Amino acid sequence: MNPLLPLMQREWLQHRFAWALLALVPLGLALLALSFAQVGVGVDVDGDTITEVTDARMAPVFALGSMAAGSGLLFVILWVASLIIISGLGRRDHGDRSVEFWMSLPVAHGTSLAVPLLVHLILVPAAALLVGLAGGWLLSAVLVGRVVGIAEWFTLPWGALLGAALAVAARLLAGLVLATLWIAPLVLLLILANAWFRRWGLVLLVVGIGIGGWVMDRAFGQPIVTDLVRDLLVNAGRALAGASGGGMVIGKDSEPDLVLGQVPGWAWQDFVAALRQLASPLLAGGLLFAAGCFALLVDWRRRGASAAA
């Protein structure tokens, strides 16, 4: 059996109940809110007047918005949860001495660290996005039914609608990988700090960045530390969506079929723009820094495993 499978299965199964709660509770609350709360969808006319939209032609737009919102909601929730969980990766196996079991597998220390990173930073958010897409399908039925009537939901152009929804999902999935590259130095630095300083790692990291940024700004007039952190986070957000700097404007008189047909093109253009942003000295330096942090983590794990043995 592939020795990587036990590592991946462990990451999935260890937090399966937390994943289920984080996925089902938000969707359940959203369904309850749409089912019983007052629902109204409006557009801004002349800059200051909100006109409620009940035109059945806009039903496909409502449905697409519901699926995109469901996917995005679960994606963000589980991605943040994964970042919190993975921050304790460095010391996790040493706390319960399970490192001794993983040492018995023919897997290098680097692989033992890389697999959990892959599962929590890529696979879990990707699965959340797909579950959110399915949940958004239920949300769309409730929203369309409340606004324009459930009969309109059954007559939606599902071919074009699913194509647009899958295009948005594909854009987020691809953007997830790119965004992970941008935040890799911050994530690896956090894991390393927690490995070295236990529960004080996050505190020391935040305080260190804050004081370092303040000193560089006040003493040298160069807020380089805070600027680097901000730029990494901003570029990570753009890698997920909005890299092109433009969006789609949907007006009251927009033709829904035309709007749905534009979504795949927008998703592709936005992804290409995100790819272009990878040609950045900031990203290259960040990845080198992340590689250094990863090497230090591997060394720390190796020394800890030798002591356990």
Image (tube, rainbow, N blue to C red):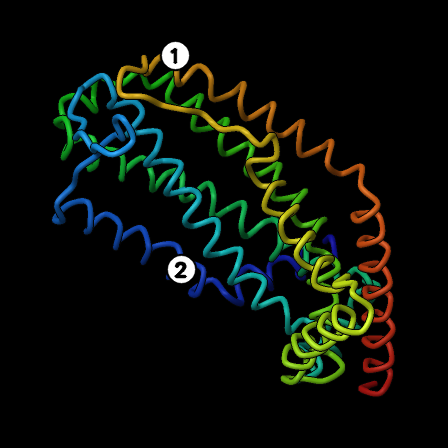
- Say what amino acid the circle numbered 1 marks: Leu
Position of residue 112 in the picture relative to residue 54 (left or right): right
- Which residue shows up at 81% across the image and 71% down it? 297
Label 1, secondary structure: give it.
Answer: helix
- The mark closer to the camera, 1 or 2, is 1
Residue 283 or residue 142, whichever sits in front: 283
Q: Is residue 204 left or right of residue 30?
A: right
Determine which of the numbered discs, if any, sits on residue 258 in the image: 1
- In the visual, does 26 lie left or right of 265? left
Residue 191: percent from left, percent from top: 70, 70
Q: Earlier in the sequence, mark 1 or mark 2?
A: 2
The amino acid on which the numbered mark 2 sits, given as a three-letter code, is Leu
Residue 280 visible in the shown view = yes
Where residue 143 sits: x, y (%)?
21, 36
Where residue 304 sits in the image (x, y, percent)?
A: 82, 82
Q: Quadrant of the C terminus?
A: bottom right
Quarter of the image holding residue 271? top right
- Mark 2 = which residue? 22
Q: Residue at x 80, y 41 (%)?
A: 280
